[in-house]
Amino acid sequence: MAEALARAVAASLPGHSRTTTDLPTAVFGADPTPAATPVAQVPHHFPARAGVIAPGSSVSASSSTRLTATLLSSTARARAVADRSASAGAAVLEIGAGTGYYLAAVLDAVPAVRGIALDVSKAAARRAARAHSRAGSVLADAWRGLPVRDAAVDAVVCVFAPRNAEEVARVLTPGGRFVVVTPTSRHLAELIGPLDMVSVDEAKEDRLAESLGGRFDLVARERVEYAMGLSRADVANVVAMGPSAFHDAERRAERIAGLPDSMPVTASVSVATYRVR
């Protein structure tokens, strides 16, 4: 998934630091903290997510590597090379960045750009701060507002994360891009029935377009799909990352224990690129 994402972002850009305070005031202003979410106000479900992103707890390395390889294709590399002369001031913001895995892939593909990882999880934000030498990390809740100046970033990335369309439109430069990765109805299809997971509505893409509230125009959409071989531990972590994590955890654990040692599972996502109006 990381290749299509980097390809989309690389095509969108005109054209470091590890802590919030080192990031340019052109993006955050003199004081980025007022819009940040106090840790005490983080919704109750995020501590569970913090466990998922702990070192050694992510989905198998082979699956993650395949995801990145798919999204960082030769086309992405070609566009990234073409953009090496881009303005060194260009910036990419990832909302719900988690550990900064995908943001780091984007920054590798577009060397002249700086990145900002935003997440409501303190554990994730700490790891994202170390994800890349040109990335900084911010602890904030996207629904409460983005601690970023108006028209300050050239692209916003959102992978399976909240989409605050009004705020994204505000922080993007004129003509800036919003790259959104969402699951299709085929995503994790082999696990839906056996684990009684929440399925993805086939109309999700239409609802995504509606949620953008007339602030964006669709530029491109690409489907990325491939097979993964997941261990029981991988399956447990994949489920814990989504909405099914909070539905009868004890029963789900019993069902996961009954799965094969290696479970063939489909990864299927849509990578949509929108231009702000």
Image: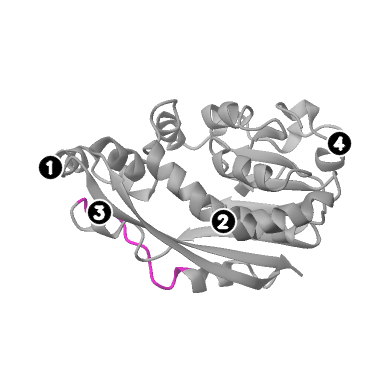
Sequence-first disc among 2 and 1: 2
Kind of residue sitting beneath label 4:
Thr
Q: Which stretch did the figure color magenta?
A: 195-204
Circles 4 and 2, Cβ within 8 Å, touching? The answer is: no
* Residue bearing the label numbered 3: 191
Type of amino acid at the residue the image marks with label 2: Ser
Q: Position of residue 120 (x, y in %)?
A: 57, 37
Residue 200 in the magenta stretch? The answer is yes
The residue carrying pointer 2 sits among few (fewer than 14), some (14 to 19) or many (20 or more) residues within 10 Å by Cα, namely: some
Question: Which residue sits furthest left?
Answer: 258
Residue at mark 2 to residue at mark 1: CA–CA distance: 36 Å
Real-space Cα separation, disc 1 to disc 4, in angstroms: 53 Å
Which residue was labeled with disc 2? 73
Label 3 vs label 4, nearer the camera? 3
Alpha carbon of mark 2 to alpha carbon of mark 3: how far?
A: 28 Å
Does residue 32 belong to the magenta stretch? no
Three-letter code, disc 1: Gly
**Residue 258 shows which numbered tag?**
1
Rounded to the nearest angstrom, the CA distance separating label 4 from label 2 is: 33 Å
Q: Give the quadrant of residue 173.
A: bottom right
Q: Nearer the viewer, residue 30 or 97?
A: 97
